[in-house]
Amino acid sequence: MSVDVATVKRVARLARLAVSEDEAVRMTGELNGILGFVEQLSEVDVDGVEPMTSVTPMAMKKRADVVNDGNIADKIVANAPMTAENYFQVPKVVE
């Protein structure tokens, strides 16, 4: 896959980035180089290789999935303009 200047400009526009003509030409070469390196990865034989999270074997740290309020509800609403029983109060907007 190769990228041309029109594609670079289109992606830049979609990302809301201002790119000059010179920058678009430079980015075209850089992106084609990056895509070339990525294409080389498809040539690597990974049959029989298990996915890993680290280069050293280790067990993932886990915590209990327990729902709680953190016991800090009063601190959370402390700076709110209006509260009631540790809930935020807002003005009524729908009649």
Image (cartoon, rainbow, N blue to C red):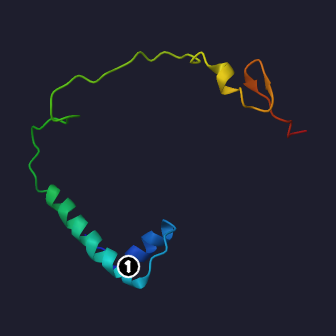
Q: Is residue 95 left or right of residue 87?
A: right
Task: Work out which residue is located at the far bottom of the displayed protein and give it.
Answer: 21
Of 18 and 48, which appears nearest the observer? Answer: 18
Q: Secondary structure at mark 1?
A: helix
Answer above or below: position of 89 versus 85: below
Q: Give me the residue at 44% from left, 18% from top.
A: 65
Residue at 33% in and 81% down: 25
Q: In the image, residue 93 lies at what x, y percent?
A: 85, 40
Amino acid type assigned to the residue bearing label 1 in the image = Ala
**Residue 66, percent across and down?**
48, 15
Task: Name the quarter where the C terminus is drawn.
Answer: top right
List x then y, in percent, for residue 3: 31, 74
| Nearest the eye: 47 or 11 | 11
The answer to whether residue 2 of the structure is visible from this angle is no
Q: Does residue 7 show up?
A: yes
Q: Quadrant of residue 85?
A: top right
Number of other residues with Cα within 10 Å of mark 1, as a class: few under 14, some 14 to 19, many 20 or more: some
Q: Nearer the viewer, residue 66 or 86?
A: 86
Disc 1 target residue = 24
Residue 38, compared with residue 81, is above or below; it is below
Q: Quadrant of the N terminus?
A: bottom left
Q: Residue at x 66, y 23 (%)?
A: 75
Relative horizontal placement of residue 81, taking residue 30 as reference (left or right) = right
What x and y, as percent, mark residue 57?
15, 27
